[in-house]
Amino acid sequence: MLSQGFAVARAALSFLDGVMAIPHVLILGGTGEARALARRLVARGDMRVTLSLAGRTEDPLPQAGDVRVGGFGGAQGLARWLRAGQVDVLVDATHPFAARITANAVAAAATAAVPLVRLERPKWERQPGDNWIDAKDTDHAASLLGEAPLTVFLAIGRQEAGRFAASPQHRYIVRSVEPVAAVDRIVGAHYILDRGPFTEADERSLLSANGVEIVVAKNSGGEATYGKIAAARHLRLPVVLVSRPQPPVGDAAATVDEAIVRIGDHVGLPADRGE
C-alpha cells in the first residue's frame, strides 16, 4: 500500500508539473520587432521568453526576457539547444537579409519538431516619385554605380560596405551602427556611426550637406530607416535598392500582433490584447 501511495504521489506531482509549466519561446532577434515581441510576451506573464542575439552589435539596446548572445553552431546546434531548453515555439525575428540564420531556423525546427513562427516586416514598395534601381545583391549594387565618379551614400550595414572598395573612383558616405572593420574600410570614405530611427527631415539634411548623388540601401522595410528613402524621393535622387533574399518559408507574420496570435495558437494560450 505504501509503494502504491508513492506511485500515486509521483503521478500527481508529474501532472502538476505539466499543468504549472509555462511555454518556452525562443526568439532569434537583433531587430526592433524581436525586441518588441519579447517585451510583449514577457509582459503577459504566461510564457518564458529567451531572446537570442548574434552578438554582432557590441552595445545592443536593452532587451526583455532571458538574453543569450552568440551563435548556436549551425542548424544542428540550434536543434540541440531547442531540445535541451525544452523550447515550445521558435520565432525567427531576424533581419530580412539574415538568410543563413533563417535557413538554419527552418532546418532546426524541423529536426527538433518545434513549431516555427517567422516574423518579417513587409518590404518597402515603390511610390510615385521614387527612382529605384533594383539590385539582386550587394555586388550587383556596386556594379550599378558605373564608372563616372559619384558621391554615394551607403546604408547597407558595416559587413558589406567593403565590397564597394573595388570602385574607388566614387566618394562614399558610409553609415553604420558599429564601426566598419579595418579590412573592409574604403580609402577616402567618410564614416558615420549612428543608430536609427532616422526622420525624413534629418536624412534630407544629411544627404544635402554631403552632396550625395545616389543612395545605396537594402530593402529592409519598416519605419525606422525609411527616412532615407523618402528623403531621396524628395531630393529626386536615385536609389540602388538591394532586393531581399528569397526566404525558405512563406507566410511570415508581418506584425508583432500577428506573431503573438500564431505563438498563442501553437501553445494553446489566448490572444494578447496588445499595448
Image (cartoon, rainbow, N blue to C red):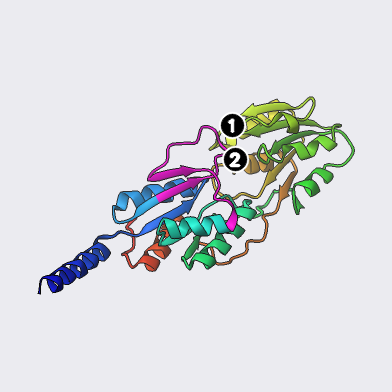
Q: Give residue 19's quadrant in the image.
A: bottom left
Alpha carbon distance from label 2 to label 1:
8 Å
Query: In this orientation, does residue 158 appear?
Result: yes
Circles 2, 1 touching at the beta carbon (< 8 Å)? yes
Left or right placement of residue 184 versus residue 2 in this view: right
Q: Which residue lies furthest to the left in this view?
A: 1
Report the front residue among 223 and 47. Answer: 47
The residue that mark 1 highlights is: 202
Dominant SS in magenta: loop
Taking the spot 58% from the left edge, 51% from the top edge, the residue there is 73
Work out whether mark 2 precedes mark 1 in sequence or the reverse, and give the earlier one: 1
Q: What stretch is highlighted in magenta?
A: 50-75
Report the front residue among 55 and 157. Answer: 55
In the image, residue 216 sits, relative to residue 221, either above or below, namely: above
The local secondary structure at tag 1 comes to: helix
The residue that mark 2 highlights is: 227
